[in-house]
Each structure stands twice: as structure tokens, then as C-alpha cells.
Image (spheres, grey):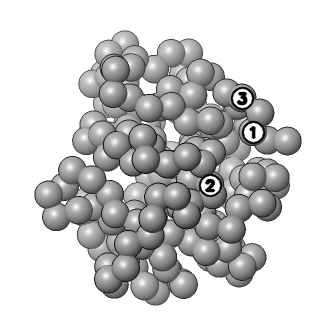
Amino acid sequence: MNKAGLRKEMKRMLTAQTGIERAEKSEKIIDRLVGLSEYSNARTILAYVSMEEEVSTGKFISRAILDGKRVVVPAVSSDERTLTLHEIKNLGELEPGYRGIGEPKDRGVCIGYEEIDLAIAPGLAFDSKGNRLGRGKGMFDKLFTKLKCQKVALAFDFQVVEEVPVDEHDKTVDAVITEKRVITRDSIGG
């Protein structure tokens, strides 16, 4: 299946889930994530703010802050081509931004890429090689080229497919966490 077809199919499957299914699966995924040594060892975590149909990250962001982590979330730049990174202290610091996704109200200070210890990434589809299909703008792919930390994607198990079609500019993740398993590309998860 090509990228457009896979995106369409994944969007259909994501919206077909009930809110209850999504919440229950999201909780299991977040429990797996916070059980990783990479989470325990991270001081500064980049976390995406979820769209309604994605693995919900709101509780994770709040938990990470309570755990004493420095939490950074992305904001879409004014040219809609890149992401800037900003620290938040609670979910109340977010407002609807690009595509209605929560972004920091205060964008005064950008966090340096080298400060991120663990990046939590979204996507529509993934495979066991760490290939990721995003929504088509390439913003996370551009961001990944600047990050030196582990990149972990959160997904519902049905979003893991046999093979994700990739182009030269597409970047991989180190692990995919679903409600059923942790799929690793290398040594993450120890």
C-alpha cells in the first residue's frame, strides 16, 4: 500500500475506535512507557500533545511533570514547516494551535534540541524496523534530524503494519509502544 492509502486506512481505523477504547488502550501504553529505563533516566522529555484520535498524552504529560521531569512540547512555526520546542509546567499552559492541537501559549523561550533526553513521537503507522508514517508535512522528520536522544512512538497495536513505505527524508523511531507490546529497533527497553 502506498503512503496515501495507508494514511487513509489508518485515519479510518483511528476514528472508528470509541473514546472508551482509546482511553483504556492509552492508559496501558503510558504504563509501558513510564516503565522504561529511558523514561526513568530522562530529565527532559519532549512529548507531543495528542489529537483526539491519537494515543492520549495528556495524563502522561501531567504524570511526567509530577515525576519531576522537565516536559517540552512542540509548537508549529509560523511558516508551518518546522517545530519549535517549549517547556510547560501544566496542561493549562496549552491553547489550540495548528490543526487545533494544543500548543504552549507562551513561546518566549525555545528549548535547545541537545537538552532533550527522550522524545515521544506521534504517527499514523509504524513497522518493526522503526519506520514511521506521519501526516505528510515532515515536521517530525525534520525535528528527528536535530535530536540525539532516543525516539519512542506511541501507537495502538493496529497501527503497526508489516511495512511502512519510506522515502529518503523519512526518519525512524527507536521503539514503538502499543497497548500489547514494545517493539524495539535496538537496545531500548532495558
The residue at the point 71 percent across, 61 percent down is 42
Which amino acid lies under the numbered mark 1 shown in the image of this protein?
Answer: Ile
Number of other residues with Cα within 10 Å of mark 1, as a class: few under 14, some 14 to 19, many 20 or more: some
| Residue bearing the label numbered 3 | 186
Q: Which residue is mark 2?
A: 118
Give amino acid for label 3: Asp
Nearer to me, 68 or 11: 68
* In this view, 91 is above or below 82: below
Q: Are marks 1 and 3 in contact (CB under 8 Å)?
A: yes
1 or 2: tag closer to the N-terminus: 2
Q: How many numbered circles does the render carry?
A: 3
Query: Observer-nearest residue: 178 or 12?
Result: 178
Q: Kindly report the distance in space between the C-alpha atoms of the residues bearing marks 1 and 3.
A: 6 Å
Q: Secondary structure at mark 1?
A: loop
**Are the two marked residues, 2 and 3, in contact with CB atoms closer than 8 angstroms?**
no
Label drawn at residue 188: 1
**Farthest residue toward the left?**
79
Q: Is residue 25 left or right of residue 99?
A: right
Disc number for residue 162: none
Image location of residue 138, percent across then percent down? 30, 40
Give the secondary structure at mark 2.
strand
Give the residue displayed 72% in from the left and 29% down from the top: 186
Between 178 and 41, the residue placed more toward the observer is 41
3D distance between C-alphas at marks 2 and 3: 15 Å
Q: CA distance from mark 1 to mark 2?
A: 11 Å
Q: Residue furthest right?
A: 190
Disc 2 marks which amino acid? Leu
Q: Position of residue 72 (x, y in %)?
A: 50, 69
State whether residue 91 is above or below residue 60.
below
Residue at image point 49% right, 80% down: 88
Secondary structure at badge 3 equals loop
